[in-house]
Image (spheres, helix red, strand yellow):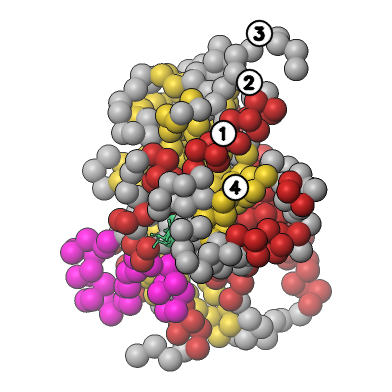
Amino acid sequence: ASDDGVPHRAPVVTIMGHVDHGKTSLLDYIRKTKVAAKEAGGITQHVGAFEAKTSKGKIVFIDTPGHEAFTTIRARGANVADIAIIVIAADDSLMPQTREAIAHAQAAKVPMIVAINKVDLPQADPERVKTDLTTVNLVPEEYGGDIIVVPLSAKTGEGVEDLLEYISLTAELEDLRADPKAEFSGVIIESRVDKQAGVLATVMVQQGTLRVGDFLVVGEKYGKIKAMTNSNGDRIKEAGPSTPVQILGFSEAPTSGEKVSSAKNEHAARELVASRVGERRDAEAARQNRKLSLEEMMGSLETVREVNLILRADTQGSLEALQGILARKEKDDVKINVMLAGIGAPTEGDVLLASTAGATILCFSVTPSGSVTKIADQKGIDLKSYRIIYELIDEVDRLIKGNVE
Ligand code: GTP
Ligand code: MG
Ligand code: NA
């Protein structure tokens, strides 16, 4: 590749695969951390972005959840990646979310490396995994194909150095470069509302440099960077390409996966937001007109049973995952109305809305305050909290069947 003076940048590597195949454990081994052991329900429910200093230099890793609920997060993880690592447990081989992860990586046109994990287990069968891979048209190099397959163990560390070597070789081939002096651009990896700190957004810097005090625009929101921390939690003043940073300064949580750009000053940021709002309103008005005429044509619709919900979750990603699941659960005779979907703990306003609308409030990974719980009790509103997504889904199934006590 011709060297046009733009410096190299660290590769962004997304780890994907079926639930419990060992993605987080692999990152724990590489980063010398113990994240997997602390997760609620033993499953990853967010996307995490980490800078790791390895024997091969800096590598940015994105950990994704393997549970089936988190399709959107996996798709986004693949989209920001330079390289995808597909983790497959040697005792389990290809499973539904393995296939899904492979499909996302292929759709995003990202080079893949297959890590066959858990080779320390007595029942491990790496050869079977390699054969199974050929059934989805991924032919390992040793079978004459072009897919790099690395057997390893996140538990003992065997093979992990080989994986880092292949990541580094693949990154070299990709010739990844970005200019720290160019205009800033990045993407929202995740955002959440912290009780004390407020809105925290994880941004991946893709080009240019972010500095404390910069104005950022994401969709129809803007903010000024008040503080920035790296993935080790250290306060930093600026961040260059291939750096995931957590930013304090948005007043509302920006949507994951959205592009982030910078504006010269507050005035320019406001103007950009105003023009985007205008465009959206025009499009909505046009859509509304079409919808009304369609309903007139079809005559009055039959009445169906309605399940009214208010959703509250800790992050945009979880909220999207829940909405995705709910959309798929709708049937001809059951309509699910999400009256409100918000990030952060439920408010008194939510309870009022629930009482007007006859809605159930479902919370995921957020804890309602004592006062809100009390008001909900007084008004006879169902307010339920879950830490594990499939328990919340079970509750939705009960609501759909209508047999909630
Ligand atoms: P999700 O994020 O929920 O999809 O799971 P994950 O793919 O991140 O898997 P996780 O790291 O949570 O590991 C799942 C289980 O497998 C845990 O009990 C780990 O201790 C275990 N595990 C992970 N890697 C290995 C390995 O190399 N060998 C053995 N024996 N166990 C492993
Ligand atoms: Mg995990
Ligand atoms: Na897990």
Q: Does dot 1 land on a helix, a strand or a loop? A: helix
Q: Residue 109 at x, y = what percent?
A: 73, 42
Q: Does dot 2 land on a helix, a strand or a loop? A: loop
Camera-near label (3 vs 4) is: 4
Residue annotated with mark 1:
165
Residue annotated with mark 3:
5
| Amino acid type of the residue tagged 3 in the rendering | Gly
The stretch drawn in magenta includes residue 292: no
Residue annotated with mark 4:
150
Give, as a single range, the part of the protein colored magenta.
367-395
Seen from the viewer's position, the closer of residues 126 and 46 is 126
| Amino acid type of the residue tagged 1 in the rendering | Glu
Seen from the viewer's position, the closer of residues 53 and 247 is 53
Residue pictured at 66% horizontal, 83% vertical:
332
Q: CA distance from mark 3 to mark 4?
A: 34 Å
Q: How many neighbours does mark 4 have within 10 angstroms: few (below 14), some (14-19), or many (20 or more)?
A: many
- Mark sitting on residue 177: 2
Seen from the viewer's position, the closer of residues 181 and 273 is 181
Placement of the C terminus among the 4 image quadrants: bottom left
Camera-near label (1 vs 2) is: 1
